[in-house]
Image (cartoon, rainbow, N blue to C red):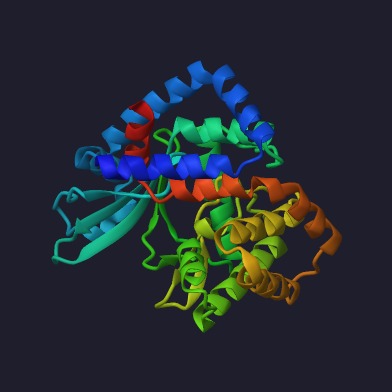
Amino acid sequence: MAKKQKLKIRDRYINIIKRTNPWMVLRFLVITIACFPVWIWVVLFSYLHSLRWRQPKIGLDLMKRHSLAFSNLVKEGQPLPAPKVTVLSGGISNLSLLWEINDAQGNVHEYFVKVFLPLGTFWAWICPIVSPFPDVYAKLSHERMSMDVVLRTHLAEHGAHVARLVAFDPVKKVMVTEFLKGQMVDQLLGEVDKSGELSELAKTVVQQCGAGLAKAHQAGVCLVDAQPANCMWVPDQEKVYFLDLEFSSRWDHRVWDMGFFMCYMKARVPGPLGKTLRKLFLDSYEAENPVDWAGIAETDKLLKEYVPVFQCILALREFTAEELFEEFLT
């Protein structure tokens, strides 16, 4: 990572910490020190695991084990082509990859690959301890992958917009889905905050987020990690897709989902514009499902002091896992 980029990450951390409740910073620091040996181990192991999955050969081996899922890429008697691997940004809990594969006719097929890392397990374990985040039932890598796969299939059957599942390997803890081309909702909100103007597109996207979350709840699924950074606007389809489902649950966390989503909106778009967007989100949800207004207010109050922490997480997601690993290790 370039020195300028390193400084960019560090400066953001420092500015965010300055705005965070000192007692909260102290609590995070104490827990970090207490868990330091585990933290170092999972960072190193996750980093090495990430480097391994950058190799096209490792991807090709997975495709061979699931050759029927990729049978459209070859003609009879021909071998599977190796993927071109690109690392995508998205934080450190998991490794996000783009596979680009040329079929026998010369057409390019793109797949999104999610490698579940030990750091995601550490994250699932530590979040409920340092914050009001609900207890995560599926913590281990294979458990989180299984939850994502099962509930992704369930939501798709009930008409929710989720990326189509292509293949999954419970041994290697890897999942492959279709690659959606669009813009993260969080990025769109960032543009609103930067421009100071509320576009019709932003209104439409936020309304679809509310309606989409209501549809997931109607299907009996709560996302738990419901936030704009886990949603993508796909212009070609004019739809919002929910991407990250590993923390999803059949427990009733509906109020948490709405409050958590809106708190991330507040972190990205503060002030009157953010208030308007949050109202659009809630009104769209309420058109599909009843809203527990008292519960929403209580969740908002509970999460208010965590807004700087959410801003820190959003800053992390702008970098690839390897960039952040290198930053932490140095």
Q: Which quarter of the figure is the C terminus placed in?
A: top left
Q: Which residue reaches farthest right?
A: 294
Which residue lies at the image location 65% right of the left edge and 49% below the top edge? 224
Measuring from the top left, give residue 16's x and y in whole percent.
Answer: 53, 44
Q: Quadrant of residue 292?
A: bottom right
User: Can see residue 115?
Assistant: no
Does residue 136 sit above or below 264 in this rendering? above
On the image, the x and y values in percent for residue 307 come to 63, 50
Occupied quadrant, residue 124: top right
Compared to 297, does 127 lie above or below? Answer: above
Q: Residue at x 46, y 69 (%)?
A: 191
User: Does the rendering let one see residue 259?
Assistant: yes
| 211 horizontally vs 39: left or right | right
Residue 242 x, y percent position in the rendering: 53, 61
- Residue at the location (32% across, 33% down)? 326
Image location of residue 63, percent across then percent down = 28, 46
Q: Nearer the viewer, residue 40 or 102?
A: 40
Q: Residue at x 55, y 19 (%)?
A: 33
